[in-house]
């Protein structure tokens, strides 16, 4: 049984088709770092329909629970930028300082979490007042962030500690630090909130974490410099930056299935719900790729702004 | 903490450019050149990962693993600098390979986490060679010293590619 409200997020329309049904997002938002912009890609036609100026070399992205707002980190200007995703305009900017990069939104609370690469902490930002309301100390150089679907836990890939922090969101307490591979960057939690997957940049592998047990339970070899992980149709999809591939593995057996020839520096990756297509931002080639999670082939390509990273959740 | 603050204040006072300083973001350089020779002839020079002596600054290439993924090479530059590299992807049919720098002093090349592609494409009976690099500046923290800025890294890699491709063209078209 699948819980659709917990997969892609509620704002992506629920589509019913024969035996299966899945969340279907209509748009991808890519942070184009060298271009200082955000591209909006219509997923039905795989065409960029708008590109707006963000500034500050945007990298990380998260969406509000209703998909109406995008939150973008700008490491260059050390800001958090709020974008109205419907009208496609920048609505608010908040200077955080430090090195804001990874970002995640809470599924119900009006909060986003921003990792500070340099100060080794996470900013808690109230999205109503658009102000920092708390800091949570974590390990060294936190990068990717993910919230469990029940909204209880925040996970932080602490890159230079080779570990993942597990944080209780209500009390802001760091409950545990779980050892993973070398230099974890992206982190993804499954739709049941049971397991988390880190892409470990330096050890060229993915670590599988049992969240409740607070320990690593598996490892999958990837291509060179894995960046982030997406999950669809019982498979894991990993962007290999230097390898130019998407490594696919079976989530049950953790066996590798295929290395899909993708593009130059594939980076941000997200599945459209637990059953839908997988989208990949290609930093080197300036496009968004669509990958079919059944056939494991590239089925579409949209040209976006220069250097898309889309680090986080970028589908709405 | 206080000491760090004092240093920061000292740097602030001495560097007016600090207002522009920031954390690093990955830089991208793409250079290409047209060579008056068929693609196979150009690939015969470019496609050997174990010999990059077409690059004028290189005095010697030593390596292991041929053109297989994970092959390595060590470049000794004419100025004595050493660059160690690894092959990440190799496609003879498409005339392209990807490699990364595994070890280099920022005094030799002011970059971090450098990776690049070299691709030769047929262009009638001529060829186009594209060299595309991705890297961070030499200083990975906020507020870099001027010699390790984004601009310095970009300038160094752009110069390397332009000079290298011009030398490659000359070598191949010159018939040597």
Image (spheres, rainbow, N blue to C red):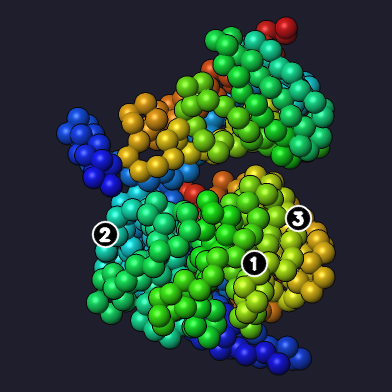
Q: Nearer the viewer, mark 1 or mark 2?
A: 1
Residue B23 is situated, as x and y percent measured from the top left of the image, at 37, 46
Could you tell me if residue A230 is visible in this image? no
Residue A222 is situated, as x and y percent measured from the top left of the image, at 73, 54
Q: Residue at position x 47%, y 49% from top?
A: A306
- Give how far apart the Cα atoms at labels 1 and 2 are: 30 Å
- Check the image and report above or below for A257 versus B141: below
Do tag 1 and tag 2 residues touch (Cβ < 8 Å)?
Answer: no
Classify residue A19 by image quadrant: bottom right
Q: Which of marks 1 and 3 is nearer the N terminus?
A: 1
User: How many numbered dots are placed on residues in this image?
Assistant: 3
- Give how far apart the Cα atoms at labels 3 and 2 are: 38 Å
Residue A51 is situated, as x and y percent measured from the top left of the image, at 41, 60
* Subunit under mark 2: A
Q: Earlier in the sequence, mark 3 or mark 2?
A: 2
Please give the residue where the numbered disc 3 appears in the rendered image: A221
Please give the residue where the numbered disc 2 appears in the rendered image: A95
Q: What element carries label 3?
A: strand
* Subunit under mark 1: A
Left or right, B10 with respect to A308, comes to left
Left or right, A88 with respect to A22, comes to left
- Give how far apart the Cα atoms at labels 1 and 3 are: 12 Å
- Tell me the crowding category of disc 3: few under 14, some 14 to 19, or many 20 or more residues within 10 angstroms, Cα based: some
- Tell me the crowding category of disc 2: few under 14, some 14 to 19, or many 20 or more residues within 10 angstroms, Cα based: some
* Subunit under mark 3: A
Residue A197 is labelled as 1
């Amino acid at each position: 049984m699948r819980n659709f409200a917990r997969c892609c997020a509620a704002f992506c329309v629920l589509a019913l088709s024969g035996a299966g049904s899945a969340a279907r997002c209509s748009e991808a938002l890519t942070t184009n770092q060298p271009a200082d912009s955000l591209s909006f890609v219509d997923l039905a036609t795989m065409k960029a329909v708008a590109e707006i100026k963000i500034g500050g070399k945007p990298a990380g992205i998260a969406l509000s629970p209703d998909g109406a707002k995008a939150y973008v980190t700008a490491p260059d200007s050390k800001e958090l930028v709020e974008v109205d995703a419907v009208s496609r305009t920048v609505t608010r900017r908040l200077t955080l300082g430090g090195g804001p990069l990874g970002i995640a939104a809470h599924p119900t609370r009006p909060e986003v979490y921003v990792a500070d690469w340099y100060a080794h902490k996470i900013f808690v930002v109230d999205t109503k007042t658009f102000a920092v309301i708390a800091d949570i100390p974590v390990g060294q150089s936190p990068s990717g962030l993910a919230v469990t679907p029940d909204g209880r836990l925040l996970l932080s890939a602490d890159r230079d500690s080779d570990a993942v922090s597990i944080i209780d969101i209500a009390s802001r307490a760091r409950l545990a630090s779980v050892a993973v591979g070398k230099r974890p960057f992206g982190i993804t939690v499954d739709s049941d909130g049971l397991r988390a997957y880190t892409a470990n940049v330096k050890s060229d592998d993915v670590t599988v974490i049992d969240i409740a047990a607070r320990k690593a339970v598996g490892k999958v070899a990837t291509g060179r410099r894995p960046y982030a992980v997406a999950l669809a149709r019982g498979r894991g999809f990993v962007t290999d930056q230097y390898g130019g591939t998407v490594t696919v593995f079976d989530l049950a057996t953790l066996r590798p299935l295929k290395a899909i020839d993708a593009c130059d520096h594939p980076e941000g990756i997200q599945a459209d719900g637990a059953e839908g297509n997988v989208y990949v931002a290609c930093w080197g080639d300036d496009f968004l790729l669509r990958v079919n999670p059944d056939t494991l082939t590239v089925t579409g390509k949209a040209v976006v702004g220069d250097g898309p990273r889309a680090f986080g959740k970028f589908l709405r | 903490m206080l000491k760090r603050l004092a240093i920061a204040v000292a740097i602030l006072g001495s560097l007016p450019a600090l207002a522009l300083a920031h954390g690093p973001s990955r830089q991208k350089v793409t250079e290409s050149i047209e060579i008056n020779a068929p693609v196979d002839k150009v690939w015969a020079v470019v496609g050997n990962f174990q010999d990059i002596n077409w690059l004028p600054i290189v005095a010697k290439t030593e390596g292991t693993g041929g053109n297989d993924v994970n092959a390595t090479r060590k470049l000794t530059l004419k100025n004595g600098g050493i660059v160690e590299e690894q092959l990440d992807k190799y496609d003879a049919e498409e005339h392209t390979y990807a490699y990364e720098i595994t070890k280099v002093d920022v005094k030799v090349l002011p970059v971090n986490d450098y990776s690049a592609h070299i691709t030769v494409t047929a262009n009638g009976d001529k060829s186009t060679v594209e060299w595309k690099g991705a890297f961070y500046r030499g200083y990975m923290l906020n507020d870099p010293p001027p010699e390790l800025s984004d601009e310095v890294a970009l300038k160094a890699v752009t110069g390397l590619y332009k000079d290298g491709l011009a030398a490659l063209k000359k070598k191949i078209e010159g018939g040597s």
